[in-house]
Image (spheres, grey):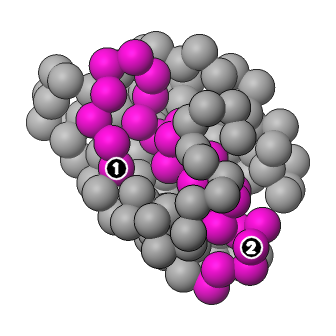
Amino acid sequence: MNGLVNASAPSRDLLRLLRAPPETRERLPESVCWRAYLELRRRGEPQASGHFVAGLRSLHRRRGIGAGTLAVTDPDVDDHKLAHDPYVGELWRSYKRALCANRTGPAGQLLREFEQQLQTR
């Protein structure tokens, strides 16, 4: 999965990755969570959406208080195309753009919409 997530990792390791998102300066940690979520969803893991949203919320809170250790670069700009639903993919792309621009307010609104869409799927 593009070197972000080991696709052969056990589901429990991927769920752990979502519960405790990585701290990296090279790429958005949210992108790592996205890839883990996609792999878990592909496997049919029922807890994937809940853990994914919880991980995103955790990262978003850290960004909101100005945690300077989180990356704001997104080398994987096309990962939204991997979404199961085009609308969810566009929300993901917009969310990442807002994060890269350090606009946590609009990103928070997009995160709420994103969460709603995942709950209805």
Is 105 or 41 nearer to us in this picture? 41
In percent of width and height, residue 36 lies at 58, 54
> Is 113 drawn above or below residue 31 in the view shown?
below
The residue lying furthest to the bottom in this view is 46
Name the image quarter holding the N terminus.
top right
Residue 47 is labelled as none
Quadrant of the rendered image containing residue 115: bottom right
Range of residues picked out in magenta? 21-46
Residue 84 is left or right of residue 80, and the answer is right
The amino acid on which the numbered mark 1 sits, given as a three-letter code, is: Pro
In percent of width and height, residue 60 lies at: 31, 44
- State which tag comes first along the sequence, 2 or 1: 1
The answer to whether one can see residue 104 in this image is: yes
| Residue corresponding to mark 2 | 43
Q: Which mark is residue 21?
A: 1
Q: Tally the numbered discs.
A: 2
Relative to residue 19, is residue 41 drawn left or right? right
Using the image as rendered, state which of residue 24 and residue 99 is in the foreground. 24
Q: Nearer the viewer, mark 2 or mark 1?
A: 2
Q: Quadrant of residue 16?
A: bottom left
